[in-house]
Amino acid sequence: MAELLTLSRHILQSSQGHEGATGDFNLLMSHIATATKVVSRQVAKAGLLNVVGKTGETNVQGEEVTKLDIIANETLKIMLDDLPVVCALASEEDESFVPTRAGRTEGRYLIAFDPLDGSSNIDVNVSIGTIFSVRRRVKVGVPATEQDFLGPGSEIVAAGYAVYGSSTMFVYTTGSGVDGFTLDPGVGEYVLSHPNMVQPDRCKVLSMNHVHRARWFAPTRAFADHILARDEERYVHTTGRYIGSLVADFHRNLIYGGLFAYPADKTCPEGKLRLLFEAQPLAMLIEEAGGAASDGRQRILDIEPEGLHARATLVIGNKHEVELYEHYERTHEQ
Ligand code: AHG
Ligand code: MN
Ligand code: MN
């Protein structure tokens, strides 16, 4: 039998010899992973527990909330609240950040998460996921403020996601490459299955919601037309895939090579996806995997969100296509 490298051992091994790496941080990472295992189980049993469907409420973003959004959010908050090293949590489903019970002022870390990404796919058994990022506080001993969460994404010390698909996977980075783990449900452990993930430099997949074309601004249309024309050798074999769960679209493109773009448009002038909860963590992952992420004008990781729920255009994947998008943004009038 081949050696099984579990996530906990991997976290421990990769932190050895790292300056500033502490047991606290390892514990935090393991705890986040365990929380996603619990959410994975809830997702798998959703149809049996009568927790599919909407709650009838809308969230701070004005979007319909599903029952599983709430369950995943509460699960993550309860599990992460337990850790004294964590000072505060910010969730896509909550208007304000939540100081933790245990680590209210002394905790050195802040965690931001999208508890369930791809909510519209929950009821139909299509892949969804959880996205997270971790920041280290500059100053401890005082209560956290919203501002603590609003630095540029380059301040993130760890980011990752769990994708609840045909199998559950956990993919993360602490700034030295990206590793992917598959949940072995029998053992209950994440096991290293995708070491050192690097995005292939080819545009196998273009992921955009083309039904929104009428709302797109001219540069986005010109960019999509460039690829769809297939004039260039690079795009002859490009195909279209769009799940509607960012995390699952991202995961597929990371493995196959390609680009995901959700642009600001005439009805969403700021864009739809959230900087803190979605764009920043995935931007860190893609850069670590050799790709790029931009809002069409600048690197996602250089943007300082104006609030917890600030949105942006997200163009993420191979450098070549991200630069092509930026080219059209520079050269075409909106
Ligand atoms: P969430 O379920 O966390 O609200 O995110 C939904 C997002 C994202 O996952 C996806 O890429 C996008 O919404 C899909 O939007 P459209 O239906 O407009 O394409
Ligand atoms: Mn989301
Ligand atoms: Mn969500």
Image: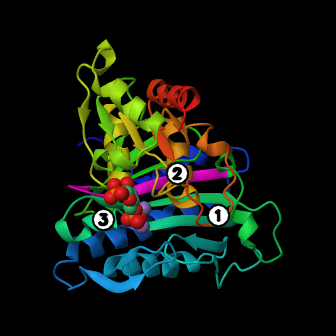
Residue carrying label 2: 279
Say which label, 2 or 3, has the lower sequence index.
Answer: 3
In front of the other: 134 or 266: 266
- Answer with left or right where residue 144 lies relative to residue 121: right
Per the model, the C-alpha gap separating discs 1 and 2 is 26 Å
Q: Amino acid at mark 3?
A: Gly
Residue 269 part of the magenta-drawn span: no
- Answer with left or right where residue 80 lies relative to residue 150: left
Per the model, the C-alpha gap separating discs 2 and 3 is 29 Å
Bounds of the magenta segment: 156-167
How is colour applied across the structure in the image?
rainbow
- In terms of secondary structure, where does tag 3 sit? loop
Say if mark 1 contacts mark 2, CB within 8 Å. Answer: no
Between tags 2 and 3, which lies in front? 2
Q: Residues within 10 Å of mark 2 (few under 14, many from 20)?
A: many
Residue carrying label 3: 188
Residue 285: horizontal and vertical position, in percent?
50, 43
The answer to which quarter of the image holds residue 125 is bottom left
Say which label, 1 or 2, has the lower sequence index.
Answer: 1
Ligand 1 in which quarter: bottom left
Residue carrying label 1: 24
Say which label, 1 or 3, has the lower sequence index.
Answer: 1
Per the model, the C-alpha gap separating discs 1 and 3 is 23 Å
- In terms of secondary structure, where does tag 1 sit? helix
Q: Residues within 10 Å of mark 1 (few under 14, many from 20)?
A: some
